């Protein structure tokens, strides 16, 4: 597997200002370019918690169009919160193209894999990782009746439901909704995202060679 043909695409959740230098997905792109031989880019959008239902299709279409630019590449998708729902909508709109890995971090999407489409992934997605934060107040709200009315799911709170092929579940009991990308945690989260592809591309030794 040629590492120069592996691309990571990072998709943010709500309340993220496009172009801000401290956005987690912008920092993730920079980290990927500094510490791995892979390519990376970000999908950015701005939406508030109430307006999330408006424009969700367009956000998914934006990602879907970007995915078509990488035909023939090995693609890894990493989403946070509502970004996970954007990812699933985009993949469904493309009839579930091949994705090497899917990382759903504190995902505000449907937890039931029959409902969210991921029970189709044995043929489409090589690896699925679900990240659960033990102190995720945002997804606790998503589980309420109001949260459901606004279109939110709570995969990142409940973990997967009815998954035909069990995904990997990574739990951090002390983390809140966005703590995966804090200054102290970003490095560890990024290694979790990239390690699988480093192994597949026979470049794991680069991690062990002193990069931090």
Image (spheres, grey):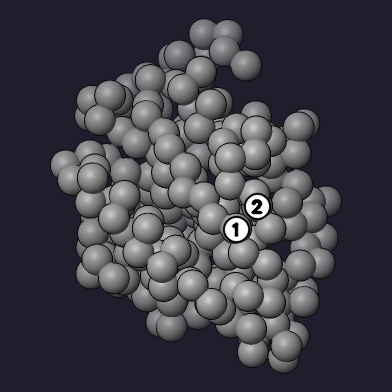
The residue at 44%/14% (across/down) is 205
Location of residue 69 (image quadrant): top left
Determine the CA span between mark 1 and mark 2: 6 Å
The residue at 69%/41% (across/down) is 181
Q: Is residue 107 visible?
A: no
Q: Which residue is mark 1?
A: 46
Q: Of the numbered discs in the image, which one, if any, rests on residue 20?
A: none
Horizontal placement of 190 versus 202: left or right? right
- The quadrant of the picture occupied by the N terminus is top left
- Against 177, residue 146 (above or below) is below
Q: Is residue 115 visible?
A: yes
Label 2's element?
Answer: loop
- The quadrant of the picture occupied by the C terminus is top right
- Which class describes the residues within 10 Å of circle 2: few (<14), some (14-19), or many (20+)? some
Q: Which residue is mark 2?
A: 16
Horizontal placement of 105 versus 141: left or right? left
- Against 211, residue 108 (above or below) is below
The disc, 1 or 2, on the residue closer to the chain's N-terminal end is 2
Given residues 138 and 135, the one toward you in this image is 138
Horizontal placement of 32 versus 183: left or right? left
Task: Provide residue 142's location: percent of width, then percent of height.
Answer: 70, 77
Asked if the residue under mark 2 is in contact with the one under mark 1, i.e. CB atoms within 8 Å, the reply is yes
């Amino acid at each position: 597997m040629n590492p120069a043909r592996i691309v990571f695409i990072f998709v943010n959740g709500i309340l993220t200002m496009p172009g801000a230098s401290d956005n987690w997905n912008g920092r993730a792109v920079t980290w990927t370019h500094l510490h791995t031989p892979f390519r990376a880019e970000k999908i950015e959008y701005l939406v508030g918690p109430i307006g999330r239902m408006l424009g969700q299709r367009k956000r998914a279409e934006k990602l879907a169009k970007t995915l078509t630019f990488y035909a023939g590449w090995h693609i890894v998708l990493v989403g946070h919160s509502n970004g996970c729902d954007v990812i699933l909508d985009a993949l469904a709109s493309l009839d579930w193209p091949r994705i090497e890995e899917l990382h759903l971090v504190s995902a505000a999407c449907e937890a039931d894999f029959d409902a969210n489409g991921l029970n189709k992934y044995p043929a489409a997605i090589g690896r699925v990782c679900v990240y659960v934060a033990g102190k995720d107040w945002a997804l606790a709200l998503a589980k309420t009746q109001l949260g459901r009315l606004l279109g939110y799911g709570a995969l990142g709170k409940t973990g997967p439901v009815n998954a035909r092929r069990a995904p990997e579940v990574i739990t951090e009991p002390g983390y809140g909704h966005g703590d995966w990308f804090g200054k102290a945690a970003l490095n560890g989260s990024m290694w979790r995202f990239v390690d699988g592809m480093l192994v597949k591309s026979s470049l794991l030794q680069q991690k062990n060679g002193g990069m931090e």
